[in-house]
Amino acid sequence: MNDAPSTSKLIFKLNDDGDKLLALYEAGETKPTLNHTMIMETLSQQGLTHLFLNESAIEDLLHKYDLNESFELEIGERQDGSCAIEMDSDNMSASLTLTPPYGGTPVILAQVRQALQEKGIVSGILDQEIEQALKDGEATDLVIAQGLHPVPGVDAHFESLIPEIRECKPHIDEHGFADFHDLGQFIVVKQGEPLMRRIPPSEGTKGLDITGRILEAKAGKDAYFAAKLQGAEIDPNDGNLLLASIAGQPKLMSNGVIVDPIINLPAVDLSTGNVDFDGTINIKGNVRECMKIKASGDVFVGGTVEAAEIEAGGNIVIKGGVIGHSEHKADKDEAHAFSAKLISKGSISARFAENTQMDAGMDIMIEELSMHNHLTALNQIVIGKSGGKKGRIVGGMACASTLVKAPVIGSNAGAITKIKVGFNPHLQAQFDQLKLDIEANEKKQEEIKKIVAFVSANPKKNVNGLLGKVVNTREKLEADCAQLHDECKRVLSEMTAPEHVQVIVDEAVFSNTEIQIGTIVCKNNVDRGKGVFQIVDGEIEFSLTLFNTDG
């Protein structure tokens, strides 16, 4: 009688030291079915799943089992918990990765402290985060140390001591349009009245990285009151206080206040002659034909300007209108000569204007009609009152950096109406000059480098410290060149890109109108309703939607 076939046996047990998990298999003639799930269930029943299990070793076990070969395999082990600390490149933070134990001993606070010490981390340690991670038993890239960044000092700055002071120009609403009902008011100060206080720079607060290294803070930049402020002086008892030295109208600057005296005139005509005044001029009535007015401050005209010239260092405000005439040249490309000229470093506003040249350092605002004028504004040109339908540009040219806006542009008859936006002639000229200065500086640097190389190669030529002098010259040129590049970047950042400017029409734009945005020209040959001319995908498009707003 034959014996019964032997059955395979598979057992799991720990080694004698209790730190390794072994799988022992004794092959037999028959073997039960075995898979990964059954192995895990068996280990769970034996209370061995808390150990670290080697998956590749378990796969090897199943393979050998399928071959019915006797074996003894190590498929797991006890593992203690571990911790690893990583520091960032600038030593301003450190992160903890905490691996839990598998049947072994968990990481304790002393181990983390030891790891921090080995990394040289002594500052900014976040104890609560570490304790919570140890309580949780695991963590991945948890920040447990954070340095203190240095806080730069505050630059010196200036505070106006005249709360009600404001620029005498139309209020600009939230949409960027002018409100002609709010042109500002005169503000008058008395001699000895405080105007502005200088707040000195602060040193800043030092920082500390996680290794305990002190990080120096950048001190704030100093700034002083501008020199030779008209009508103002520094308090002899307080070098940070600016006082009015005369009575007059205060005008804010970035680092000071000037005080303009004011002259009041009933009119400007042959009885007064031409007026040239270092201050603000307030004219109650009209400015007659052929008169010339020049002021370092504002010019206010309560009546009409008749073919006269006005130049102001501030704003020009005309309650009435401007009526001039132009001499048309035989050459159509040659600029017309206008008898009425308004030149302002600030803004220009009037009720209407005809045959007038206006050049404004800020805005031009005309309430009703601009006819055959040449308008140039370094910011925007707005024709018509905000929300109103009355206002038209007919003929002539209107040039602005950011915006030209009117209810109606052009007409069915007469000369072409030209609108140009997206350029700043003053900034462009400044930018071009800076480029020339940089080119000249770099040429000088190349010449100096050749001299340095020659003297270095021929020490006998280094007479009376020539090499040192030449090197100093080179360093001065390099510093000047860096300053020129910074100024070039500043000017470039202030130049308005064509993609951010518009020509806005509130009611209608007629044919025989030419629109130019940047270098792109659009000849409008059809009558249109309300809409916006702007750059879309490199071309001028007319639509009802403002695509390029600041949000």
Image: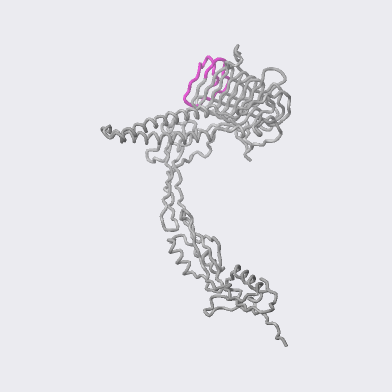
In the displayed structure image, the side of residue 480 where residue 354 appears, left or right: right
Main secondary structure type of the part rendered in magenta: loop
474 vs 254, left or right, is: left
Q: Which residue is drawn at 41% across and 56% down?
A: 213
Q: Which residue lies furthest to the front in this view?
A: 1
Horizontal side of residue 194 vs 30, given as left or right: left
Q: Give the range drawn in magenta.
A: 265-292
Residue pushed farthest bottom? Answer: 1
Q: Is residue 396 magenta?
A: no
Quadrant in the picture for residue 210:
bottom left
Q: Where is residue 410 in the image (x, y as percent from the top left)?
A: 69, 23
Judging depth in this view, the residue of 99 and 387 nearest the camera is 99
Residue occupying the far top of the picture: 330
- Quarter holding residue 242: top left
Tell me if I can see residue 338 in this picture: no
The residue at 55%/15% (across/down) is: 290
Quadrant in which the C terminus is drawn: top right
Q: In this view, does 241 lie above or below 436?
A: below
Query: How far from the left and from the top, in percent, is residue 19?
Result: 53, 76
* Residue 201 occupies quadrant: top left
**Magenta stretch contains residue 283:** yes
Residue 262 location (% of width, % of height): 49, 27
Seen in the picture, residue 161 relative to 293 is either above or below; the reply is below
Q: How many marks?
A: 0
In the picture, which quadrant includes the N terminus? Answer: bottom right
Look at the image and tell me whether residue 510 can be seen. yes
Q: Position of residue 120 (x, y in %)?
A: 42, 61
Give the camera-side residue of 501 and 111.
111
Q: Pick whichever, 144 or 107, lies toward us.
A: 107
